[in-house]
Image (cartoon, rainbow, N blue to C red):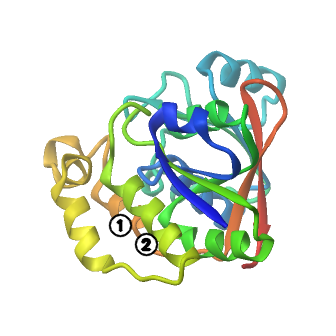
């Protein structure tokens, strides 16, 4: 098994084989949490305009999304695991668009054989899923901030999945300390940013291996992916 770690939108375009598009803060962590809370179907959408058009076609769907971390105008929720608590997600269809994760799906679709949504909350399940299939090529794509700048949490997740596939270990606590110290982690502890980046999101996104299912992205159109929950692994 040839495992490569790639980064950002350019890396997503280079992905081949079984591809994991990783967005820990917060897109694919949120999708895992929403499925765990009972969501029936998730659609990941690249363009904001397409997400809004889907909402018109599916008026009962819940519209979730952000740009620059902030909830998009007129959307039901932003990209926050903690701020979506307390809502009854059972049986709901979700339309989800973000700055990095959903853009990575679109970028990777040209070359990947299969695409999984990657996050720390189900990283071990992803590794077990890949190990069971034993594909020749595996691409782990750390999407980073807006798909343009390295983010340590995505880089950690990619290395963690690679380590699991290779039978190695990482010092998770030391790695998390480094993530928290970086600006991408520190913003969740900034009192001035709690309305957009609440501290609870940090802990919910770095809750290693909380879920035993994977989420596979099945392309339905150029900008739309049906996110299929597959479990248990």
Residue nearest the observer in this picture, 107 or 206 = 107
The residue to which callout 1 is attached is 203
Residue 25 vertical position relative to residue 63 in the rendered view, above or below: below
Does residue 119 appear anywhere in the picture?
Answer: yes
10 Å neighbourhood of mark 2: few (<14), some, or many (≥20)?
some
Is 76 on the left-hand or right-hand side of 186?
Answer: right
Instruction: Give the distance between the C-alpha atoms of the residues marked 2 and 1, in whole angstroms.
Output: 6 Å
Q: Please give the count of numbered marks on the rendered protein.
A: 2
For the N terminus, the quadrant is bottom right
Residue 17: where, in percent of width, then height? 72, 50
Q: Which of 56 and 188 is in front in this view?
A: 188
As helix, strand or loop, the secondary structure at mark 2 comes to: loop
Residue 56 sits in which quadrant?
top right
Q: Position of residue 16 (x, y in %)?
A: 68, 45
**Left or right position of 39 against 104:** right
The quadrant of the image that shows the C terminus is: bottom right
Residue 207's disc is 2
* Circles 2 and 1 in contact, beta carbons < 8 Å: yes
Asked if residue 76 lies left or right of residue 89, the reply is: left
């Amino acid at each position: 098994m040839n495992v490569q770690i790639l980064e950002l939108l350019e890396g997503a375009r280079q992905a081949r084989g079984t591809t994991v598009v990783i967005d820990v803060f917060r897109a694919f962590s949120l999708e895992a949490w929403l499925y765990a809370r009972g969501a029936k179907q998730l659609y990941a959408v690249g363009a904001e305009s397409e997400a809004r058009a889907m909402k018109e076609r599916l008026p009962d769907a819940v519209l979730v999304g952000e740009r620059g971390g902030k909830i998009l105008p007129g959307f039901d929720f932003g990209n926050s695991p903690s701020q979506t608590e307390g809502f009854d997600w059972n049986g709901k269809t979700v339309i989800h668009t973000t700055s990095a994760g959903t853009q990575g799906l679109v970028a990777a679709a040209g070359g990947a054989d299969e695409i999984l949504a990657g996050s720390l909350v189900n990283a071990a399940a992803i590794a077990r899923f890949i190990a069971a299939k034993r594909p020749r090529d595996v691409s782990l794509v750390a999407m980073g901030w807006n798909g343009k700048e390295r983010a340590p949490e995505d880089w950690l997740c990619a290395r963690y999945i690679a380590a699991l596939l290779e039978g190695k270990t990482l010092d998770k606590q030391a790695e998390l300390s480094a993530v928290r110290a970086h600006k991408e982690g520190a913003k969740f502890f900034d009192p001035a940013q709690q309305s957009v980046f609440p501290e609870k999101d940090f802990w919910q996104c770095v809750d290693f291996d909380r879920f035993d299912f994977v989420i596979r992205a099945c392309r339905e159109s150029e900008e739309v992916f049906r996110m299929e929950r597959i479990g248990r692994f």
